[in-house]
Amino acid sequence: MRSHCVKVLGTGSGIPEGRLTNNDLEKMVETSDEWITARTGIKERRIVKPHESAATLSLQAAWTALERASVSPSELDVIIVATVTPEMPFPATACILQDQLGATKAACFDLEAGCTGFVYALSVAEKYLRGGGGEKALIIGVETLSRIVDWQDRSTCVLFGDGAGAAVLGIADEPGVLATYLGADGRGGPLLELPAGGSRIPPTSETIERRLHYIKMSGNEVFRFAVKIMEEASREVLRRARVPIEDVDLFVPHQANIRIIDSAAKRLGIPRDRIFLNVQKYGNTSSASIPIALNEAWEENRIFAGDLVLLVGFGAGLTWGSALIRW
Ligand code: UT7
């Protein structure tokens, strides 16, 4: 009989080589390493070179995850790419990736849920496989935020970075993804948006001049929302899985700001040694942040077979999501 569990079979990442440090930013806008470190925990971020894009980073992450999962592209039933910076408005980055991988039988689509994108993709793919859509899924979180950051706006340009993370999921006999929880509140949309370039404000020379093709954010409001929702989303997914918080081996939160992570962890009573942190190296990579962290935690032997891993994210939309995984 067909099993109804979905496991993570392998992870990978695509990290651009270009580095931008806080000291580099000091030469670009009125800021300081002290301010950025104290307010965000970020020391540097990775930035794509002109020849790199969402597809090149995704491809790198995908090959590593497929190799570690011992899955070939032809076995994939679905590819989901979570991103706010796709290769282009259409076709979907997932279709471009499918062609490059030769994953000919996979259904492909992109998903946009702000920084929660990867958790959304995980939840959708898990339900797709469990619902009979196939045996294997490739999910990616990828961003080239350096292409939509306003490099003259010090309140946002110090925060974001580029990268990709991937996971291969498969039907298995033993439990893997134990529970997921997704939510959204569209009333908070204006708090974090890229106003132009869509059907409401199509691109014109005026929209470019008014810098409407860049990220606009109300940092304080997003901060307050983030701390509250990280706690709520963590508690809800644990409630759904009937797992006490003490049993979680590793907490892998969206890497937006060390202060958000610390405040949420304090409310949840999670000690620092059970939290994975890499915001200092990559900044906020939106959809890519959680899968990059998950992959790095695995590479650094912070996750072992049988461990309980809690993913939790929040982002533009506003959106939030959490997932509890038995590794
Ligand atoms: O993935 C979801 C995406 N977004 C987030 O997670 C962002 C959530 N928000 C945050 O992380 C924080 O709100 C920020 C890091 C963006 C800002 O930190 P804050 O402690 O909320 O600072 P603030 O916005 O209240 O600004 C304090 C001061 C202001 O100066 P005045 O008005 O007090 O004189 C800012 O102008 O810091 C100033 N400031 C800066 N100073 C130096 C803002 N950005 C900078 C900067 N360097 N880069």
Image (cartoon, grey):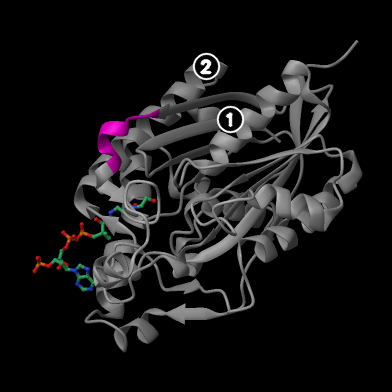
Name the residue at the bottom extreme. Answer: 27
Please name the amino acid that badge 1 sits on.
Answer: Leu
> What element does badge 2 sit on?
helix
**In the figure, 142 relative to 135: above or below?**
below
How far across and down, in percent of the image, does residue 211 sit? 28, 68
Q: Which residue is more in the foreground, 180 or 231?
A: 180
Neighbour tally class for label 1: few under 14, some 14-19, many 20 plus, Cα within 10 Å: many
Quadrant in which the N terminus is drawn: top right
Tell me the residue that label 2 is attached to.
Answer: 240
Left or right: residue 216 compared with residue 145: left
Can residue 230 be seen here? The reply is yes
Please name the amino acid that badge 2 sits on.
Answer: Arg
Left or right: residue 199 compared with residue 221: right
| Residues drawn in magenta | 184-189
How far across and down, in percent of the image, does residue 40 sit? 32, 62
Neighbour tally class for label 2: few under 14, some 14-19, many 20 plus, Cα within 10 Å: few
- Mark 2 beta carbon near ligand 1 (under 8 Å): no
Is residue 185 covered in magenta?
A: yes
Tell me the CA gap for discs 2 and 1.
Answer: 9 Å
Which residue appears at 46% of the width and 80% of the height?
20
How far across and down, in percent of the image, does residue 74 sit? 90, 44
Count of number-bearing discs? 2
Choose top left, top right, bottom left or bottom right for residue 2: top right
Q: Earlier in the sequence, mark 2 or mark 1?
A: 2
Is residue 118 covered in magenta?
A: no
Left or right: residue 216 compared with residue 179: left
On residue 324, the disc is 1
